[in-house]
């Protein structure tokens, strides 16, 4: 297991909280299967965060949820790009 944090779920949560930055250097050492597993966990967290119903007048909660969703989306894009490069054999 090469996941930072021990598991794909823990790494996805760390990405969501901002403890880990999804850079090519961090993601390059993961295998194709591990990248797919991490993408799956990120998609689960995204669905969970998007499904939260928050009062429109509760601005701090809305901001926190939106920041987490943005971090997960950017991590998803970065991981997808690294996965495509690995599948093409460029990394």
Image (cartoon, rainbow, N blue to C red):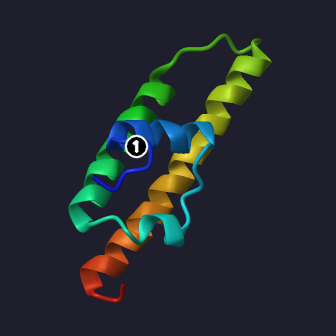
Residue 49 spot, x, y in % from top left? 49, 27
Mark 1 lies on a secondary structure that is helix
Near-viewer residue (87 or 28): 28
Indicate left or right for 35 with 58 as reference: left
Q: Residue at x 35, y 89 (%)?
A: 90
Asked whether 2 or 59 is in front, the reply is: 2
Disc 1 crowd, CA 10 A, few/some/many (<14, 14-19, 20+): many
Vertical position of residue 51 compared to residue 57: above or below: below
Q: Position of residue 1 (x, y in %)?
A: 27, 52
Residue 4 at x, y percent in the picture = 44, 49
Residue located at (59% from left, 55% from top): 21
Q: Image height check: is 58 above or below 72?
A: above
The one nearer the camera, 30 or 64, is 30
Please tell me whether residue 58 is drawn above or below residue 13 in the rendered image. Answer: above
The residue positioned 43% from the left and 43% from the top of the image is: 11
Which residue: 66% across, 10% down? 55
Task: Determine whether, in the image, residue 79 is placed left or right of residue 59.
Answer: left
Residue 64 lies in what quarter of the image?
top right
Locate residue 79, reporting x and y percent: 42, 62
Above or below: residue 7 compared with residue 87:
above
> Residue 48's quadrant in the figure?
top left
The quarter in which the C terminus is drawn is bottom left
Residue position marked by numbered label 1 in the rendering: 42
């Amino acid at each position: 297991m090469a996941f930072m944090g021990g598991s794909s779920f823990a790494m996805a949560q760390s990405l969501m909280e901002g403890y880990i930055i999804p850079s090519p250097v961090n993601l390059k050492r993961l295998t194709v299967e591990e990248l797919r597993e991490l993408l799956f966990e990120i998609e689960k967290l995204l669905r969970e965060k998007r499904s939260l119903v928050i009062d429109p007048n509760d601005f701090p909660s809305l901001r926190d949820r939106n920041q987490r969703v943005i971090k997960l989306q950017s991590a998803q894009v970065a991981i997808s790009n690294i996965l495509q490069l690995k599948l093409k054999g460029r990394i």
